[in-house]
Amino acid sequence: MNSVPEKYSSNPSIQDNPMTYELLDVPQLDGPPMTIGVYSFTDKTGQRAPSTGAANLSSAVTQGAEVWVMDALLEAGGGKWFEVVERVGMDNVIKERQLIRSTRENYETEATPLQPLKFAGLILEGGIVGYDSNTTTGGQGARYFGIGASQEYRIDTVTVGMRIVSVSTGRVLMSVAAEKSIASYRQSTDVFKFIELGTRTVEVENGYSVNEPTNLAVRSAIEATVIELIYEGVRKGLWNFKE
């Protein structure tokens, strides 16, 4: 029995940022980090995972993309650009604060007051706005006396949109979109022969396929969009790079 290659094993591993160096290479902000809140970053495509057989109930893209948005904001410029405040799990934060306040009031003679929650001056809105499957397909193959080989490929495209909103005015300061291609590749060889005057057949097949993870493609598009938001803000004079 053939063993699974090491890189395809089921052992867990830390997922590196696809655009780590690009995020870290963003020049630093000329000023203190900006406080920003991310309430949600949802899948707005409604697409199901591509399938050649029966209908697939799995979504084509991740339903928790706000994790990658927050990570990209925290990593931009070495963490010198944004201070991200919790908004997705805001109910949990409020419940925990109520529990702390109640415990201190009942069991401490001089209850230490909690610090006020930090408010955000900016809100990041958006989501995964497009998932187009089979935007490009192709391949090649040949067969000679029952022996053949073939190659096929397919390209899908995921599109991410973001906008930054001013809390004080409600004005959309900027809006940026980015897209990332998702490549799938398959190669196979086969042998098909009739033996013993056509009464028996021999058929052998061998092949493999490589599919780029959709999750990494979504993450790359999100990180590229965050980088573009920063540069777009500089072009519009909303903030400046530190000289």
Image (spheres, rainbow, N blue to C red):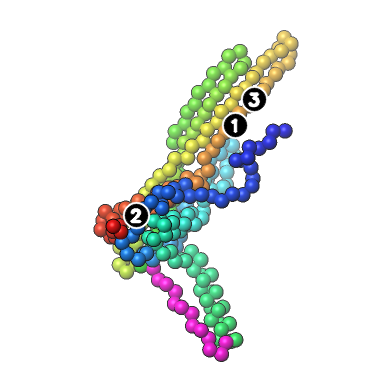
Look at the numbered disc 2 and give the secondary structure of its residue: loop
Q: How many marks?
A: 3
Q: Which mark is residue 58?
A: none
Query: Which residue lies under the disc numbered 2?
Result: 27
At 60% across and 23% down in the image, what residue appears?
189
Vertical relation: 162 (above or below) 199: below
Outermost top residue: 197
Amino acid bearing label 1? Tyr
Q: Position of residue 74 (x, y in %)?
A: 44, 59
Look at the numbered disc 3 and give the secondary structure of its residue: strand
Quadrant in which the C terminus is drawn: bottom left
Q: In the drawing, does residue 86 fall left or right of residue 55?
A: left
For the magenta stretch, what is the residue range?
A: 108-120
Query: Which residue lies under the disc numbered 3?
Result: 205
* Label 2, residues with CA under 10 Å away: few <14, some 14-19, many ≥20: some
Quadrant in which the N terminus is drawn: top right
Amino acid bearing label 2? Pro
For the residues labelled 3 and 1, say whether their Cβ atoms are less than 8 Å apart: no
* Label 1, residues with CA under 10 Å away: few <14, some 14-19, many ≥20: few
* Label 3, residues with CA under 10 Å away: few <14, some 14-19, many ≥20: few
- Most common SS among magenta residues: loop
Mark toward the viewer: 2 or 3? 2
Amino acid bearing label 3? Glu
Residue 218, magenta (yes or no): no
Which one is earlier in the sequence, the residue at label 2 or at label 1? 2
At 52% across and 40% down in the image, what residue appears?
212
Query: Which residue lies under the disc numbered 1?
Result: 208
Which one is earlier in the sequence, the residue at label 2 or at label 3? 2
At 49% across and 57% down in the image, what residue appears?
67
